[in-house]
Amino acid sequence: DSGVTQTPKHLITATGQRVTLRCSPRSGDLSVYWYQQSLDQGLQFLIHYYNGEERAKGNILERFSAQQFPDLHSELNLSSLELGDSALYFCASSVGPGTSGEQYFGPGTRLTVT
Amino acid sequence: GEDVEQSLFLSVREGDSSVINCTYTDSSSTYLYWYKQEPGAGLQLLTYIFSNMDMKQDQRLTVLLNKKDKHLSLRIADTQTGDSAIYFCAESISSGSARQLTFGSGTQLTVLP
């Protein structure tokens, strides 16, 4: 158990809908990262938050957004969903800058868009 | 640029050693990581190495780093069926005050009885 929690574990929704994925980092970690894992794209970095502030963006679509709250949990919002958004979405956490940067991953949310 | 490459598949016999290889391109990488993903699970951090090291050993795991060739390997001694999983190597790139990870495509390790 990495100490990172994600909810829900599975999510099935229809095209055009909006969903919110939630992540709680390990105790003491200030950085939260979101990744998308699909068969054709592999593991893609989406976005990074540190202590409530956005720090870096990767291959994140404009239909997707995220935030990190004062209690350090994070939410990833996916809107206008398309079939191609079906994937595993992982959250990872790390202590923050100035460290060896290892990230600890949650169990993931499997999103199925029908 | 950032690119991490791994071979897709590796099969070994139980009890043999497994060697999973990875190449990366960014010479500014300072840390390199190995993660393990079992079916339906998240990525589990196995080990990492700092770029000024050549080798790191942790029980059955040995990481070798050839910085000149930008080549990283993970050796698993006495491979067991429980080691069957996908193994990802990742490089760490500093981006401002943050550290981003770029992952390879993963190597599917199958351990045969």
Image: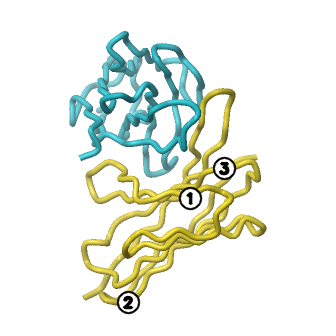
Chain colours: A cyan, B yellow
Image quadrant in which the C terminus of chain B is located: bottom left
Where B20 falls versus A51 (above or below)?
A: below
The residue labelled by disc 3 is B30
Instruction: Tell me the CA gap for discs 2 and 1.
Output: 24 Å
Q: Does label 2 or label 1 sit earlier along the sequence?
A: 2
Residue under the point 59% across and 31% down: A58
Choose mark 2 or mark 1, whichever is in front: 1
Instruction: Confirm whether residue B48 shows in the render.
Output: yes
The image shows residue A82 at horizontal and vertical percentages of 41, 28
Judge if badges 1 and 3 mark residues of a common chain. Answer: yes
A99 with respect to B96 (left or right) = left
**Which structural element holds mark 1?**
strand
Q: Is residue B33 above or below residue A54?
A: below
Q: How many numbered marks appear? A: 3
Question: On the image, which quarter does residue A109 sit in?
Answer: top left
Circle 1 residue = B49
Residue labelled with disc 2: B16
**Which chain letter matches label 3?**
B
The percent coordinates of residue B17 (x first, y second) are 42, 85
Q: Is residue A2 left or right of residue B68?
A: left
Please give the name of the residue rendered at 36% of the width and 42% of the height, measured from the top-left corner. Answer: A105
Depth order, front residue of A104/B110: A104
Q: Nearer the viewer, residue A93 or A100?
A: A100
| Contact? badges 1 and 3 (CB < 8 Å) | no
Q: Chain of mark 2?
A: B
